[in-house]
Image (cartoon, rainbow, N blue to C red):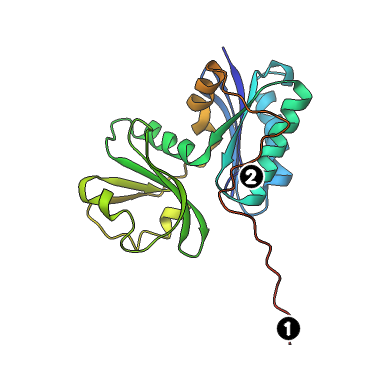
Amino acid sequence: MAKILQIETATQVCSVALSIDGKTVIVKEESGQNIHASNVTLFIDEVVKAAGLTYQDIDAVAVSKGPGSYTGLRIGVSTAKGLCYALEKPLIAIETLEMMAAGFLIENPEYNGLICPMIDARRMEVYTSVFNSSLEIIEPTSAKIIDETSFADLLLQNKITFLGDGAAKCAETLHHPNAGFSDQNFNAARNMSVLANNAFNHGHFEDVAYFEPFYLKDFVVTQPKKKV
């Protein structure tokens, strides 16, 4: 049975879980700004010890690869790669939006509409994609600026549940009887357990040396305006 350490740092949530054979057994997480660097390694250590394992008992490390926060993704991926390199274990990368959709379906197994996870980017822009209830991609991952016409064609014939920190700011813009919103947090490492186990069983591993997060957009450094 595969024992997989799972790391999610794509948003303000710092989340670590351990799964065995696709079932989550231990979770440690906290939400807040700029907490990933100080917390992620501590959470990993706590989770491994709480499961009664050693680091060598771990069969693989799975990480949420993005899109999401540039800094958060860098911390999560570099931590995962460091562990894989030191322990000589395989690296599994899970697309963050797919992980969120999978988490929603775990909580709502009878749901048969579409799922639109959203990660807050800036202003009215979000990182998003659309899945059906079988986790098949209906719209691929992209950066969208949301207005009242967004997803209009899909909403005509489908119920869509919008979720994630990006959906909260779009609730007042997307007015349609087929649009629903979930306020639950699905940016959690526990939601990648089934996906990570499937990847492990099929040998879908990343090159530890060359793997990079899926940023979707280039990171832009802005300089503060000088005071006159």
Image spot of residue 168 (x, y percent): 42, 56
* Residue visible at 51% across and 42% down in the picture: 187
* Residue visible at 58% across and 45% down in the picture: 10
Q: Is residue 183 left or right of residue 64?
A: left
* Residue visible at 47% across and 49% down in the picture: 142
Callout 1: SS:
loop
Q: Residue 30 — which label?
A: none
Looking at the image, residue 212 lies above or below residue 61: below
Looking at the image, residue 88 lies above or below residue 148: above
Image spot of residue 174 (x, y percent): 32, 59
The quarter of the image holding the N terminus is top right
Residue 166 visible in the snapshot = yes
Mark sitting earlier along the chain (2/1): 2
Callout 2: SS:
helix
The amino acid type of the residue labelled 2 equals Leu
The amino acid type of the residue labelled 1 equals Lys
Are the residues flagged by discs 2 and 1 in contact, CB closer than 8 Å?
Answer: no
Within 10 Å of disc 1 (Cα), the crowding (few <14, some 14-19, many 20+) is few
Q: Quadrant of residue 117?
A: top left
Looking at the image, residue 1 lies above or below residue 106: above
Image spot of residue 24 (x, y percent): 52, 25
Q: In this view, does 171 lie to the left or right of 98?
A: left
The quarter of the image holding the C terminus is bottom right
* Residue visible at 63% across and 28% down in the picture: 206
Image spot of residue 221 (x, y percent): 68, 62
Q: Name the residue that disc number 2 marks.
A: 73
Residue 118 visible in the snapshot = no
Gap between marks 2 and 1 measured at Cα: 32 Å
Between 221 and 33, the residue placed more toward the observer is 221
Q: Name the residue that disc number 1 marks.
A: 227
Looking at the image, residue 88 lies above or below residue 217: above
Q: Residue furthest top?
A: 1
